[in-house]
Image (cartoon, rainbow, N blue to C red):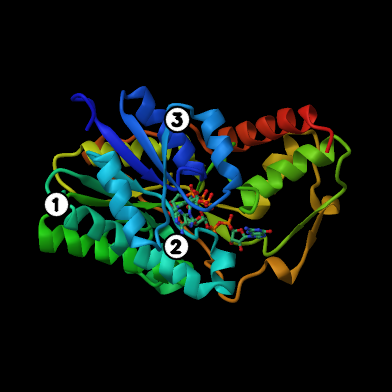
Amino acid sequence: MTNGTKSALVTGITGQDGGHLAQLLHEQGYTVYGLVRGQRNPKKAEVEREYPYVELIEGDLTDATSLFRAVEVANPSEIYNLAAVSHVGYSFDNPSLTADVTGKGVLNLLEAVRLTGRSESTRVYQASTSEMFGGLDYNRPGRGYNEQSLFHPRSPYGVAKLYGHWIARNYRESYGMFVSCGILFNHEGERRGLEFVTRKVTNAVARISLGKQDHIVLGDLWPKRDWGYAGDYVRGMWQMMQHSEPDDFVLATGQTHSIEDFLTLAFAEVGIGDWRPYVQQDPRFMRPAEVDILLGDPTKAETVLGWERYVDFPGLVNLMVMHDLEFERSTSR
Ligand code: NAP
Ligand code: F7E
């Protein structure tokens, strides 16, 4: 902690949620430290430009000593562990790396907190995921998945996250550490990586409407996701860290939509009524095992934390397309 103000260490600072969270924590008066990896990470300059108040510390979730050092330097009252190999498709091609980063990386971080003597003074947020549920028929409750639902992950990513989830719970139970897990359903926005389907679509829609591109190539279009806005979800993470007890919370909208639904709304934003002529499909973007449908029940977070959402599904599509239109108009590529 610095001069009585709270300080936070955010892993995954260069990612979508890292940016939203850095902004929120800064607005709340925190000293914000961000873990950034690699000798020449191209996203480092982006963070320095967009969030100049973030103090960057070099480190990697697979390098335990770097995490010890980061925890010593930041001496944080709160740690948000957002770093991960987070792309489900990529995790099928790189399952071992995914296990090391997304799974064992959580253990490395928890050990850094415990072995530097901060078990009582540092609260930890673990970024768990709806991918742990798997979307299978037998495991799909009527009102959506909640904190009591069974886990059945369907990808190396989901399996690695489940290890991270349980080791986080184990440190809570074994050492009395304040470790909370947010089981977050898909959340998107203007900072979403272009490798995820929503941003891939909104960016292509913007480019197609400006004549820079003539079609988009996607995988399966029938899967359904419970899509919310990332800005709303990072506020939920912070609320979990302010709660009196460590616990697990689902953050979701309680509504689910297919990729076809997303395409319909996104193309309509630029006045295109029928998206089919602009969309091709390629098995390259299909997964060995798919999560058919995800629907979450955020009742606990709403009632216990008072968590609220301000952006609905049409609002999300609108803000992403508008952002990408503005961006694509400003560049010649
Ligand atoms: P993201 O944009 O993909 O960001 C992932 C971050 O992890 C990046 O900053 C990346 O840094 C970092 N990272 C990757 N490997 C690392 C390593 N070995 N050491 C240190 N950092 C590493 O992910 P996001 O959408 O912001 O999601 C944040 C977290 O929530 C992730 O853990 C994700 O799995 C989880 N989650 C996301 C969603 C969602 O819908 N967005 C839902 C549920 C859970 P580089 O820039 O160096 O690659
Ligand atoms: O895929 C289908 C794909 O990669 C969504 C991560 O943040 O949320 C995210 O995981 C759906 C899947 O997100 C393409 O098969 C079709 O059914 O945008 P996505 P995801 O797999 O749901 C969870 C909660 C996380 O925790 C993850 O970290 O869209 N799909 N065509 C495609 N997906 C991609 N990426 N690209 C396509 O061309």
| Res. 131 mark | 2
- Label 2 C-beta lies within 8 Å of the nearest ligand 2 atom: yes
Residue 162 at x, y percent in the picture = 35, 67
For the residues marked 2 and 1, what is the alpha-carbon distance in whole angstroms? 33 Å
> Please, what secondary structure does the residue beneath circle 3 have?
loop
Could you tell me which quadrant the N terminus lies in? Answer: top left
In the picture of the structure, the residue carrying the numbered disc 3 is 310
Pair 2/1: label in front? 1
Residue 172 at x, y percent in the picture = 16, 58
> Please, what secondary structure does the residue beneath circle 1 have?
loop
In the picture of the structure, the residue carrying the numbered disc 1 is 117
Q: Quadrant of residue 235?
A: top left
Give the amino acid at mark 3.
Answer: Tyr
Identify the residue at image location x=58%, y=36%: 46
Residue 167 at x, y percent in the picture = 26, 65
Judging depth in this view, the residue of 90 and 38 nearest the camera is 38
For the residues marked 2 and 3, what is the alpha-carbon distance in whole angstroms? 24 Å
Q: Quadrant of residue 104?
A: bottom left
Give the amino acid at mark 1.
Answer: Gly
Identify the residue at image location x=23%, y=28%: 2
Give the amino acid at mark 2.
Answer: Glu
Above or below, 120 against 150 in this view is: above
